[in-house]
Image (spheres, rainbow, N blue to C red):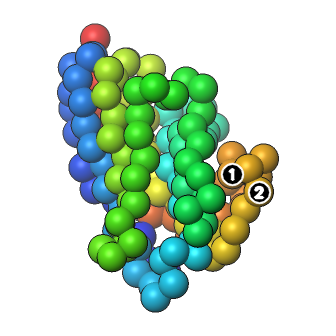
Amino acid sequence: VQLQASGGGLVQAGGSLKLSCAASGRTFTSYTMAWFRQAPGKEREFVGGLRSHSAGTHYADSVKGRFTISRDNAKNTMDLQMNSLEPEDTAVYYCAVRLGSLILSALRTTGNYDYWGQGTQVTVSS
């Protein structure tokens, strides 16, 4: 599986950005997919994820209500729509895939994912 993330950039606080992650593979619907981010000097943290077979979408508390994840199974893509961006959202954003399902409590653990995209920088200015 290869992942290609795109859409990062520089935006002012309060603005919006949309990230996209394109995935290769033939069984896209069976993938668990997620977005993580890593700010300088910090550990990689969970942003939100889509459980396989439409089992639900889950978000970190810090982005709930501002970020929305969606997937297009026909195009093998996952998007992250980010609204009301804050300087604290500045980070490199990564998409990740697990070849199978994950229980809800396991979504947030980086070690549970099999493949990672290259990351895309999001910078929010104050």
Lateral position of residue 3 relative to residue 36, left or right? left
54 up-or-down from 1: above or below: above
Q: In this view, does 74 lie above or below 15?
A: below
Based on the displayed image, in which of its 4 quarters is residue 77 positioned?
Answer: bottom left
Residue name at image x 78 percent, y 47 percent: 105
Q: What residue type is labelled 1?
A: Leu
Q: In which quarter of the image is the C terminus?
A: top left
User: What residue lies at 27% left-to-right and 16% top-to-bottom?
Assistant: 13
Q: Residue at x 72, y 62 (%)?
A: 102
Left or right placement of residue 98 versus residue 65 in this view: right
Q: Mark 2 points at which residue?
A: 103
- Structural distance between the alpha carbons of marks 1 and 2: 7 Å
Disc 1 vs disc 2: Cβ atoms closer than 8 Å?
Answer: yes
Q: Name the residue under label 1.
A: 107
Label number found at residue 78: none
Which structural element holds mark 1?
A: loop
Q: Bin the neighbour count of mark 1 within 10 Å (Cα to Cα): few under 14, some 14-19, many 20 and up.
A: many
Residue 41 in the image, given as x and y percentages of width and height:
57, 31
Q: In what element is the residue under mark 2?
A: loop
The reply to whether residue 120 is visible in this rendering is no
Location of residue 6 (image quadrant): bottom left
Q: Is residue 41 visible?
A: yes
Q: Is 54 placed above or below 119 here?
A: below
Please indicate whether residue 19 sits to the left or right of residue 62 in the image.
left
Query: Which amino acid does the dot numbered 2 rest on?
Result: Ile
Q: Position of residue 118 (x, y in %)?
A: 41, 61
Which is nearer the eye, 15 or 120?
15
- Residue at 31% from the left image edge and 49% from the top image edge: 19
Dot 2 crowding, Cα within 10 Å, few <14, some 14–19, many 20+: few
Which is more foreground, mark 1 or mark 2?
Answer: 2
Viewer-proximal residue among 22 and 40: 22
Q: Position of residue 112 (x, y in %)?
A: 72, 61
